[in-house]
Image: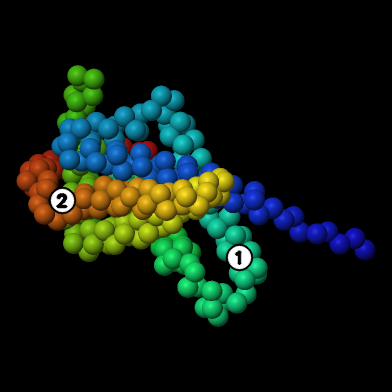
Amino acid sequence: MSTSKPCRIPSLVKKYLMAISGLVLVGFILGHMLGNLQFFMGPEVINAYAYHLHHLPGAPFSLWAIRGFLLLMLAVHVWMAILLTKENREARPESYLGQKTNVATYASRTMPITGVLILAFIVFHILQYTTRVVPEDYNQTIGESTIEVAHVQLEYFDVYAMMVSGFSSPIISLFYIVTMGLLCMHLSHGVHSMFQSVGLRNESWRPKLKLAAAAFAGLIFIGFASIPAAVLAGAGSGYLAEKEAAWANAPAKSAPAH
Ligand code: HEM
C-alpha cells in the first residue's frame, strides 16, 4: 500500500508568501486611508472619488478583479499565518507554558488575536459600507445627491452622508477607533517582520526598521481614526441634517449596485 506524504510548503516560501500578501494588503490599507481622508475636503470631493472608484476603466469587471485579487491576498495571508503559527509552536513547545514569551513583544504575541479581530471588523465594515445591510438603528442613511464629475452634474450615491450618519453613532465610532488601534498594533509588528522576511536582518538596521514600522502604523491609526473622531466632534452634521430633510420629502432611489 502506498503512503502519500502531505505536501509541505517550505518555511522560507511561507514567509515570503506572508510578506508579499502583507505588502499588498498594506498597500490597500494605505490607499484606502488616503482615499478616505478626502472626507476632510468635503462632500463634493469624496463623492466624486467614490463615483470614480465604481467607474474605473473596464468596470464592473475591473472592480471585481481588484476585489478578487485582494480577497486572494487576504486568504493567502491568513493561511500562511496559520501554518507559520503552527510551525513555530511545534518548534518551541515550551512557549505554550509561557517560558519564552518574555523575548517577544506584546504586539508580536498578540498577532493571531489582533488578526482575527481585524478580520471580524472587515466583515462588519463591508456589511456596513459596501453592501449596506447594517440596520438603520446604526444610523445608516443612504441616498443620492448631485455630484459634479467632469463638469457634468449627476445624481449619485452620497458616500459622505453615509459616513457621517454611520459615525454619528458613538458605539460605531468607538468600535472603529478601537479596531484601528488593533490594526496599528498588528501593522507595527507585521511591517517590521516583513522587512525581516525579505532578508533585512542587519542588526544595526533593526531598531530603525522597528521605529519606521511603528511610525507607519501610528500614521495609519491617526488617518483612519480621525474620521469617526471628527464626526463625533460634529463634522458634517449640518450637511447630513439638510440631506435627511431633503430625502424625507423626496424618498431617495435605491443606491446604485456595485
Ligand atoms: C475610518 C475608517 C474607515 C472608513 C471611513 C472606511 C470607509 C469605507 C467605505 C465608505 C467603503 C465603501 C466604498 C464604496 O463602496 O464606495 C469601504 C469599503 C471597504 N473598506 Fe473601508 N473604511 C475604513 C477603514 C477600513 C479598514 C481599516 C480596512 C481594512 C483593514 C477597510 C477595508 C475595506 C474593504 C475591504 C472595503 C470593500 C472595498 C470594496 O470591495 O468595495 N476599511 N470603506
* Residue at screen point 74% across, 55% down: 7
Residue that lies at the very extreme toward the top in this rendered image: 151
As drawn, 192 above or below 43: below
For mark 1, does the 10 Å Cα neighbourhood hold few (<14), some (14 to 19), or many (20 or more) residues? few
Quickly name the residue at label 2: 230
Label 1 lies in ligand 1 vicinity (Cβ under 8 Å): no
Which SS class for mark 2? helix
Is label 2 in contact with label 1 (beta carbons under 8 Å)? no
* Residue at screen point 27% across, 42% down: 36
Residue 226 picture location, percent across and down: 21, 50
For mark 2, does the 10 Å Cα neighbourhood hold few (<14), some (14 to 19), or many (20 or more) residues? some
* Residue at screen point 15% across, 51% down: 230
What amino acid type is highlighted by mark number 1?
Answer: Asn
- Is 93 situated left or right of 222 in this image? right
Residue that lies at the very extreme toward the right in this rendered image: 1
* Residue at screen point 62% across, 71% down: 92
Q: Is residue 85 visible?
A: yes
- Is 171 situated left or right of 30 in this image? left
> Which one is in front, 123 or 191?
191
> Which one is in front, 255 or 40?
40
- Residue 88 numbered tag: 1
Residue 138 picture location, percent across and down: 23, 59
- Is 57 situated left or right of 231 in this image? right
Residue that lies at the very extreme toward the bottom in this rendered image: 97
Which SS class for mark 1? helix
Label 2 – label 1 distance at C-alpha = 42 Å
What amino acid type is highlighted by mark number 2?
Answer: Ala
